[in-house]
Image (cartoon, helix red, strand yellow):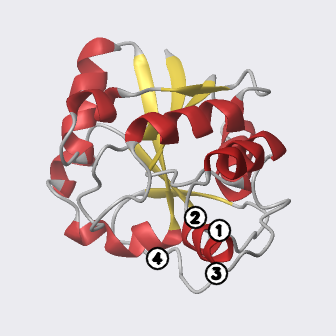
Amino acid sequence: MSRIGLLGGTFDPPHIGHLIIAQEVCQALKLDKVWFIPTYEPPHKNTVKVDATKRVELLKLAIKDNLSFAINTIEIDRAGKSYTIDTINILKEMYPETDFYFIIGADMVEYLPNWYKINELIDFIQFVGVKRPGYKLVSNYPIVEVDVPMVDVSSTIIRERIQRNESIQYLVPDCVHTYIKERGLYE
């Protein structure tokens, strides 16, 4: 059986926090790979700031140097709102010999009771919770906890800094920074 971590998100833009989480979980759970799954339209957020094509390009740049990382565009290819249960059902059908580990931050752990078809979902995947400042990893659902270095960075903070014409250096990989700057994203 293959062991694949799944890290979903808007990645609007991807940042070092995403990369640290993916690396630490991959290492701690001895996963074969971590697939980054950018969503087309997340069910829990109103909007994304940059279109899916650019977000995938940013993600490709962010992960290009790590052979344990890959991108799966299943949710972008489907378009519309994506629910995790739908994505997992398709992935389980496509990869029946794979155990999936769905990586979520502590903010999403607290939100699990509100997830669409959560009671079905927990039968198909193992949730992996990582700490996030201001949230506790407490749930009635089975969660494997992985300690990761706390880096209080978010895509929102990065977008806000860009709008205020402040530096985002070291918050995103240099190649992501260059891509954002050259194309005037998030201004």
Image quarter of residue 85: top left
Circle 4 or circle 1, nearest the eye: 1
The reply to whether the C-beta atoms of the residues labelled 4 and 3 are less than 8 Å apart is no
Circle 4 or circle 2, nearest the eye: 2
Classify mark 4: residues with Cα within 10 Å, few (<14), some (14-19) or many (20+): few
Classify mark 2: residues with Cα within 10 Å, few (<14), some (14-19) or many (20+): some
The reply to whether the C-beta atoms of the residues labelled 1 and 2 are less than 8 Å apart is yes
Mark with earlier residue (1, 3)? 3
Mark 1–mark 2 distance (CA, rounded to whole Å): 5 Å
Mark 4–mark 1 distance (CA, rounded to whole Å): 28 Å
Mark with earlier residue (4, 3)? 3
Kindly identify the amino acid type of the residue bearing the numbered disc 2: Ser
Residue under label 4, please give it: 138
Disc ID at residue 155? 2
Residue 136 relative to residue 27: left or right = left
Classify mark 1: residues with Cα within 10 Å, few (<14), some (14-19) or many (20+): many
Residue 31 relative to residue 38: left or right = right
Residue under label 3, please give it: 133
Residue under label 1, please give it: 158
Mark with earlier residue (4, 2)? 4
